[in-house]
Image (cartoon, rainbow, N blue to C red):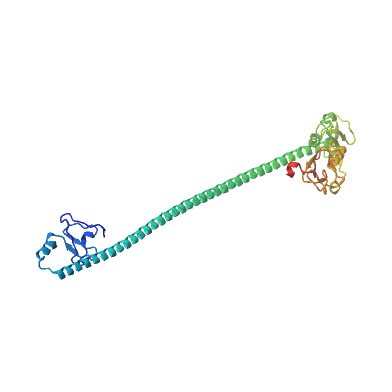
Amino acid sequence: MSDSLYDGDIYPGVMWYCEQCEELLNKQDGFYDYCDEWTCTECYHTNPISEEKITDYSDNANNSENSWDAGTIAIVGAALLGTLLVTSHLDKRQQKKQKKWLAIKEQQEEAAQQRLAAQEEWEQYAEKQRLEEERRKKAERIRLEKQAEQRLEKKQQKEAERIRLAERNRNRTEGIRLAKQQERSKNRIRRKKQIKAFLFHKKNIELGAALSDFIEADVKLAVLHFHNAGFTNVQIAPIKDIFAGSKKQVGEVEQIEINGNTIFQKNSTAPYDAKIVITYHEKGEISFPLSPKQVKKMDVQALADRLQKLGYTNITTVSLNDLVAGWIKKDGAVKQVTIAGNASFEKDRMYPFDTVIIMTYHSLKSKAQRA
């Protein structure tokens, strides 16, 4: 209900009242006097709006002006006052209803906004979950593809390794077969030479080379020559005399004896079972004078000097940088010695002069390491 009072357009100044509840229609929202009828917003009674329904109270009052007495006027005034009071009460009740309706409408709008906000929040959460699920599926797919690629790569590597090993085994088998075939062929040739020498030359076979042809040559070539010539008793004797600074080469032939004879020519002969001793040069060996227990706690420099004097040439020292004060373990004390990678060596065992010897020793940390 509106607080303003509609004054009328077609019928100015006319006050329209509901025929059933006597509510003033001019104060109801949306009321206009140019409509043919109006439904009361209080009792929902349909009231006709026409000129026939207009009553001129002023004319009636003038016509009966002389017939009204003081009592009648008082009654009419009381009735008008009651009507105003009732109208005021109805207006307040309508205002309360309108306020209540507006409050309910506000609550409904607020609830609708909350539902909309909750729906938007849920949609955002659902979208986030969908994107996260897609990301997870993509990561899982990439991981599975990578695993498949790795498995395929490993399979290919294994297959390549299998083929390589098979090829190597075939080559090795073929090499062994060819070597055996060549050895059998050489044995047949040597056997023929030995039979011919036994039958016609009292077992004598021509040497095919003079002593000068073998001096300073490699011992392997000398052994191979006498074997191919048909001799069956070829022996080698190393002379371990090569040390640092030596001019001799490892495997270099020094002397050849055939049944004790050191002088022979290319056309000289000897029995195929004659004793042939080939003497050649080899690395010199030095006795290591200490045990693993004895070298521990020795001064690293003193031990290195001692070994160098004995003739060892390939000595390496490794600092541990593990001491702070050096009270319990002394700076420079040997912790371990390895000879050719072996830390469990035997005392007085012979080793080549150039064997790798590594000595690890305790040492003080630097200032930077201490910090």
**Image quarter in which the N terminus is found:** bottom left
Residue at 32% from the left image edge and 61% from the top image edge: 99
- Residue 268 is situated, as x and y percent measured from the top left of the image, at 85, 31
3 or 190: nearer the viewer:
3
Q: Tell me if residue 273 can be seen.
A: no
Exactly how many numbered labels are in the figure? 0
124 or 68: nearer the viewer:
68
Residue at 67% from the left image edge and 44% from the top image edge: 169
Residue at 59% from the left image edge and 47% from the top image edge: 154
Q: Quadrant of residue 22?
A: bottom left
Given the current orientation, which residue lies at the most extreme right position? 260
Up/down of 48 relative to 236, above or below: below
Given the current orientation, which residue lies at the most extreme front position? 70
Q: Tell me if residue 109 can be seen.
A: yes
- Residue 36 is situated, as x and y percent measured from the top left of the image, at 16, 59
Given the current orientation, which residue lies at the most extreme bottom position? 71
**Image quarter in which the C terminus is found:** top right
Up/down of 110 relative to 171, above or below: below
Left or right: where 369 falls relative to 197: left
Q: Quadrant of residue 59?
A: bottom left
265 or 158: nearer the viewer:
158
Up/down of 179 relative to 18, above or below: above
91 or 162: nearer the viewer:
91
Q: Quadrant of residue 367?
A: top right
- Residue 29 is situated, as x and y percent measured from the top left of the image, at 24, 58
Left or right: where 66 falls relative to 344: left
- Residue 191 is situated, as x and y percent measured from the top left of the image, at 78, 39
